[in-house]
């Protein structure tokens, strides 16, 4: 089979872009740019290249290859010897006799693989001429792929400059037939010219592999593309965000990042499966924390839908007494009108204690015996595991938010900068350069209606300012003091006809409270 189907024309590259570098950049990248003239062809948007193509298309692959080669600056044929393959990844060569094409199969990608440097995937260094031409411009990467031996597989593409940023991993769902998958990236201006790389990352172990035969790179003038989009107000994609109460903040931050796209909040609690499927039927990207059981149905009706899994943040270390409670008779969550409760207060109500006796249990000694001062490690470990399951790097998240001090309003209501940080990481996974982490994004903080206090003893333990027993609930209701809070809770329980014998903890072991609080309060079990 012939290689080099697309011939790179340096003369055409110079006509399209010329040199746009400072003298210091010229000195540092002299070896890669000497062949590029300083003249710029007027009104040239795409690289004009001399392309040698077959006169007939005898297969689907040939048709797709012809399609991605048009206007491209580079065409790559996948072979095991043409790339760097990380340890543990499976890479094998094959020939498809039906389509008359050589291809490689990739499997067992590392879910922790980085998209920077040469990338942690199947990595190909681009020619120096392409690196020079792409510097400071917009690149479009087309790749021809299919699921290997299955109906569907997942893979990711990354473009890395190895010195001035990378695209992050763009994830795709490959179908059983050869198809073209596309990612785009704005390349920063090169400095020393350490090489540009394309990385391909197959899904992790025990998941289907993916076949690859060709990819191409088209280079356009970034500034012209942005101006055209601004002038025409073009909406390029529809992005759906589905999570819990964190949906609004994530959506608002992503809209700031993907300003050219339409980003819609479709929270899980507010929509049925059918309603969600209706929204997803014409969407390009679904960013979700849950309900992946309908993913296959989504992909049946909208096979080009890209799905990104995100974490639903939960961090109880600052608010270890906060729980949910259920009615035993119906197993329904008790809302008063919110669904947050103090575990100590619920236990006292369940055991028919007086308000003053329950208030006496809010002490440092009781908190210690209940393990309230030892929730930090389990909270961090939970987030680490959660981010790992979403293929997100917790090292780019946890150190940042921990440095801010108290970063939660409650166990699952983060402060706004936490959601902005998470949105930036989601954007990186969807292809935005890691420099987005430094971008200043200001959105409204929508989770301040309910603020659970950090008890003074807990605040002192973590050296946090502002510890109190002041609760804030919907309608700007402020409850100050433990006694007043317990009375407020009792009134809500009674107004909803929640009897003391008909209430239980949800998701927490009550026997620990029986063991610790029983002897102190004189309750025998």
Image (cartoon, grey):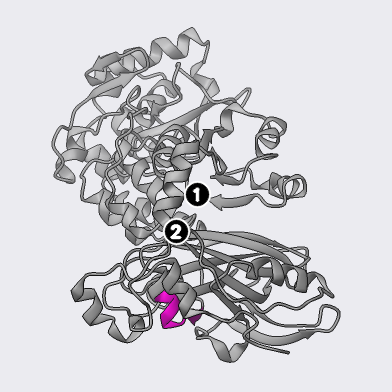
Q: Could one spot residue 197 in this view of the protein?
A: yes
Which label number is shown at residue 392?
Answer: 2
Residue 310: mark? 1
Provide the secondary structure element on which disc 1 rests: loop
Work out which quarter of the rendered image holds the C terminus and state it: top left
On screen, residue 459 versus residue 75, left or right, reads left
Residue lying furthest top in this view? 495
**Are circles 2 and 1 on residues that touch, CB within 8 Å?**
yes
Residue at left offset 59%, top offset 66%: 71
Q: On the picture, is 496 further left or further right than 474?
A: right
Residue at the location (66% across, 75% down)? 212
Q: Position of residue 484 (x, y in %)?
A: 27, 14
Secondary structure found at label 2: loop
The boundaries of the magenta stretch are 123-131
**Crowdedness of circle 2 by 10 Å Cα count: few (<14), some, many (20+)?**
many
Residue 184 disc label: none
Above or below 490: residue 457: below
From this viewpoint, is residue 415 visible? no
How much space separates mark 2 and mark 1, taking CA atoms? Answer: 8 Å
Q: How many discs mark residues in the rendered view? A: 2
Q: Residue at x 43, y 64 (%)?
A: 41
User: Crowdedness of circle 1 by 10 Å Cα count: few (<14), some, many (20+)?
Assistant: many
Residue 135 location, x and y as percent? 37, 68
The stretch drawn in magenta includes residue 144: no
Name which of mark 2 and mark 1 comes first in the sequence: 1
- Give the quarter of the figure containing the N terminus: bottom right
Q: Where is residue 181 in the image (x, y as percent from the top left)?
A: 63, 62
Above or below, comparing residue 474 to residue 285 in the picture = above
Near-viewer residue (436 or 59):
59
Q: Locate residue 77 relative to residue 390 in the image: left or right.
A: right
Q: Which of 128 and 221 is in front in this view?
A: 221
């Amino acid at each position: 089979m012939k290689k080099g189907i697309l011939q790179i024309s340096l003369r055409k590259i110079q006509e399209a872009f010329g040199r746009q570098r400072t003298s210091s950049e010229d000195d540092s990248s002299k070896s890669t740019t000497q062949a590029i003239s300083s003249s710029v062809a007027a009104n040239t948007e795409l690289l004009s290249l001399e392309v040698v193509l077959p006169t007939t298309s005898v297969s689907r692959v040939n048709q797709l290859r012809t399609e991605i080669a048009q206007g491209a600056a580079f065409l790559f044929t996948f072979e095991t010897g043409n790339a760097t393959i990380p340890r543990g990844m499976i890479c094998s060569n094959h020939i498809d006799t039906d389509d008359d094409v050589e291809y490689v199969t990739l499997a067992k990608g590392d879910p922790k693989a980085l998209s920077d440097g040469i990338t942690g995937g199947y990595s190909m260094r681009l020619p120096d001429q392409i690196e020079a031409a792409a510097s400071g411009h917009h690149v479009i990467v087309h790749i021809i792929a299919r699921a290997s031996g299955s109906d569907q597989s997942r893979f990711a593409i990354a473009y890395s400059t190895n010195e001035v940023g990378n695209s992050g991993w763009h994830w795709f769902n490959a179908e059983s037939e050869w198809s073209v998958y596309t990612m785009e990236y704005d390349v920063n201006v090169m400095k020393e010219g350490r090489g540009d790389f394309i990385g391909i990352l197959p899904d992790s172990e025990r998941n289907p592999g993916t076949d690859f035969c060709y990819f191409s790179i088209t280079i356009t003038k970034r500034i012209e593309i942005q101006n055209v989009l601004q002038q025409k107000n073009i909406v390029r994609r529809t992005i759906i965000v589905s999570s819990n109460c964190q949906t609004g903040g994530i959506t608002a931050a992503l809209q700031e990042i993907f300003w050219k796209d339409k980003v819609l909040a479709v929270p899980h609690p507010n929509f049925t499966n059918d309603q969600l499927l209706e929204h997803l039927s014409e969407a390009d990207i679904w960013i979700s924390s849950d309900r992946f059981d309908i993913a296959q149905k989504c992909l049946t009706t909208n096979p080009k839908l890209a799905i990104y899994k995100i974490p639903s943040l939960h961090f109880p270390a600052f608010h270890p007494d906060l729980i949910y409670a259920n009615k035993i008779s119906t197993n329904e969550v008790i809302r008063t009108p919110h669904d947050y409760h103090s575990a100590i207060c619920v236990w006292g109500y369940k055991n028919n204690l007086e308000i003053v006796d329950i208030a006496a249990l809010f002490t440092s000694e009781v908190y210690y015996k209940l393990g309230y001062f030892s929730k930090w490690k389990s909270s961090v470990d939970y987030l680490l595991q959660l981010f790992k399951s979403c293929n997100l790097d917790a090292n780019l998240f946890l150190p940042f938010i921990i440095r801010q001090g108290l970063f939660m309003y409650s166990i699952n209501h983060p402060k706004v900068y936490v959601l902005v940080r998470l949105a930036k990481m989601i954007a990186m996974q969807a292809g935005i350069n890691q420099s987005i982490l430094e971008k200043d994004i200001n959105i409204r903080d929508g989770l301040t209606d309910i603020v659970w206090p950090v008890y003074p003893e807990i605040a002192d333990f973590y050296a946090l300012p502002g510890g109190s027993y002041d609760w804030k609930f919907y309608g700007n209701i402020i409850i100050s003091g433990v006694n007043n809070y317990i009375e407020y809770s009792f009134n809500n329980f009674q107004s909803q006809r929640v009897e003391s014998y008909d209430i239980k903890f949800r998701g927490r072991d009550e026997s620990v409270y029986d063991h610790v609080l029983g002897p102190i309060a004189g309750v025998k079990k």
